[in-house]
Image (cartoon, grey):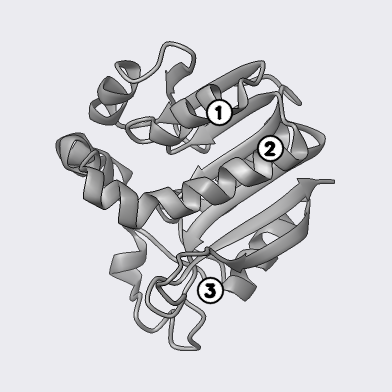
Amino acid sequence: MQQAPARAFNRLVTLGWNRAARLYNTPILQRLAYRPPQDEIIAQLALNRAQRIVDVGCGTGILAARIAADLTPEAVYGCDVSAGMLQQAISRSDRVEWRRRRAEDLGFPDAAVDAVVSTHAFHFFDHQAALAEFHRILVPGGLLAIVLNNPSSRFARAFQPTPIQGLAYFPPPSEMRALVEAAGFTITEQRPVQRHPIPPTLVPDVVTVARRD
C-alpha cells in the first residue's frame, strides 16, 4: 500500500488555524459541518463507556467540552498544536485538561487512556506516526474513533497531488482501513456520517471505529 507522506508543512497549517480560530466557532459552520460527526463520536463513547478520553486535534474545544458535559467521564483531554485554537478552548470548559501537543507526540504514558477520538483533523497528521501514538497510549481493547473526509472515488489520490499531500492528505476508506489495521487495531465499523437530509455524496466524511489489539 502506498503510504501518505509525513506532513511537511505542519507549521504553516498551525499558523493558519491560529488565525482561523474565531471563524471556526461560527454557529452555522459548527451546526452544518461539525455537529454531525461530533454526534457520531459522542454516541461511540457513550456506547463504550470510556472514562479517560483524548480528543486529538480538538480545535476550539467544542467536542471535548461536550464529552465532559454530556458523558461526565473520569477525565477528558483536548490536544491541539494551535495556540489560537486552544486559547478559545480554555475559555470553553474547565472540566477538560487542554494540552498543546502534536498528534504524533501526545505526552501520555503507555496504556493511559480508554479512548482516542479525532474529527476532521487526521488529514493534517503524519498518519503512521499518529496511529502508532494512539496505539501506544490506549489500553488494550481501547476505542479509536476517527471522522475524516474519505473520498471513495478511485481518482481520490489523483485529485491530491504530492504538493497538496504535504499540507493534508485524505485517504479513501479502503486505505484508511489499511492504515488503521497496520497500526495494530481491529476495525469494528466504518460508514458515512449521518447528515440527514444531506446525502453522503455531498459530504464524504466517514467514521472509522476500531479497537486496540
Tag 2 near tag 1, CB within 8 Å: yes
- Name the residue that disc number 3 marks: 172
Residue 148's tag is none
Q: CA distance from mark 2 to mark 1?
A: 9 Å
Q: In the image shown, does 121 or 48 lie closer to the viewer? A: 48
Residue 8: % across, % down: 35, 51
N-terminal label among 3 and 1 = 1
Q: Can residue 120 be seen at all in this image of the molecule?
A: no
Residue 29: % across, % down: 25, 51
Vertically, is 46 above or below 185? above
83 left or right, relative to 128: left
Asked which secondary structure carries label 1, the reply is helix
Vertically, is 140 above or below 89? below
Q: CA distance from mark 3 to mark 1?
A: 32 Å
Local crowd size for mark 3, using a 10 Å CA cut-off: few (<14), some (14–19), many (≥20): many
Residue at figure coordinates x 45%, y 36% from the top left: 63
Q: Residue furthest top?
A: 94
Local crowd size for mark 2, using a 10 Å CA cut-off: few (<14), some (14–19), many (≥20): some
- Name the residue that disc number 1 marks: 70
Local crowd size for mark 1, using a 10 Å CA cut-off: few (<14), some (14–19), many (≥20): few
Amino acid type assigned to the residue bearing label 2 in the image = Ala
Q: Nearer the viewer, mark 3 or mark 1?
A: 1
Amino acid type assigned to the residue bearing label 3 in the image = Pro
Residue at figure coordinates x 48%, y 46% from the top left: 38
Residue at figure coordinates x 63%, y 48% from the top left: 145
Residue 174: % across, % down: 63, 74
Residue 46's tag is 2
N-terminal label among 2 and 1 = 2
Q: Nearer the viewer, mark 2 or mark 3?
A: 2
Q: Residue furthest front?
A: 197
Q: Residue furthest bottom?
A: 154
